[in-house]
Image (cartoon, rainbow, N blue to C red):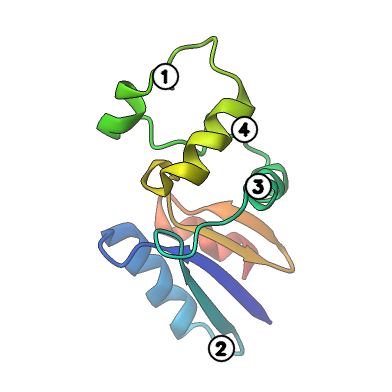
Amino acid sequence: MQAIIYHNPRCGTSRKTLEILEKAPAIAVRVIEYLKDTPTKAKLKELYKKAGITPREGLRAKEPLAKELGLNDPDVTDDQILDAMVKNPILINRPIVETKNGVRLCRPQDLVKEII
């Protein structure tokens, strides 16, 4: 099975999730450092839909930039949040893992076990 992890190597939770994936038997891991290789708006939409969450739930709301851009305002639309994420990928909460069994925003990291 293949697992794709949208990863930030500076994030402890992301590193722990990657470690779980690398130790799992028969899983080929593809690492996408989303700060360098940002997913498109369409891909983010797809990932959040498969994960059963909204773009707002996938937003790093505590990131100072989110506050600066007013993204925590309840009137901000999903499209506005997604546009901001594509322009400023630091706003994407991580790690996101995609396998044939589904997608999870792996916070905490053990959520990855639901899809491997």
Q: Nearer the viewer, mark 3 or mark 1?
A: 1
**Mark 3 residue type:** Ala
Q: Please, which residue is most extreme toward the bottom here? A: 26
Name the quarter where the C terminus is drawn: bottom right
Q: Nearer the viewer, mark 4 or mark 2?
A: 4
Q: Nearer the viewer, mark 2 or mark 3?
A: 3
Q: Which mark is residue 72?
A: 1
Q: Which mark is residue 54?
A: 4
Dot 1: element? loop
- Residue 86 x, y percent position in the rendering: 52, 45
- Residue 94 x, y percent position in the rendering: 43, 52
Separation of marks 2 and 3 at Cα, in angstroms: 23 Å
- Residue 76 x, y percent position in the rendering: 54, 16
The residue positioned 45% from the left and 57% from the top of the image is 95
Separation of marks 1 and 4 at Cα, in angstroms: 13 Å
Question: Which residue is disc 3 drawn over?
Answer: 51
Dot 2: element? loop
Question: Which residue is disc 2 drawn over?
Answer: 25
Q: Where 114 falls versus 3 (above or below)?
A: above
The residue lying toward the viewer, choosing from 87 and 34, is 87
Label 2 crowd bin: few (<14), some (14–19), many (20+), radius 10 Å: few
Q: Is residue 87 left or right of residue 19?
A: right
Separation of marks 3 and 1 at Cα, in angstroms: 21 Å
Q: Which mark is residue 16?
A: none
Res 74 visible: yes
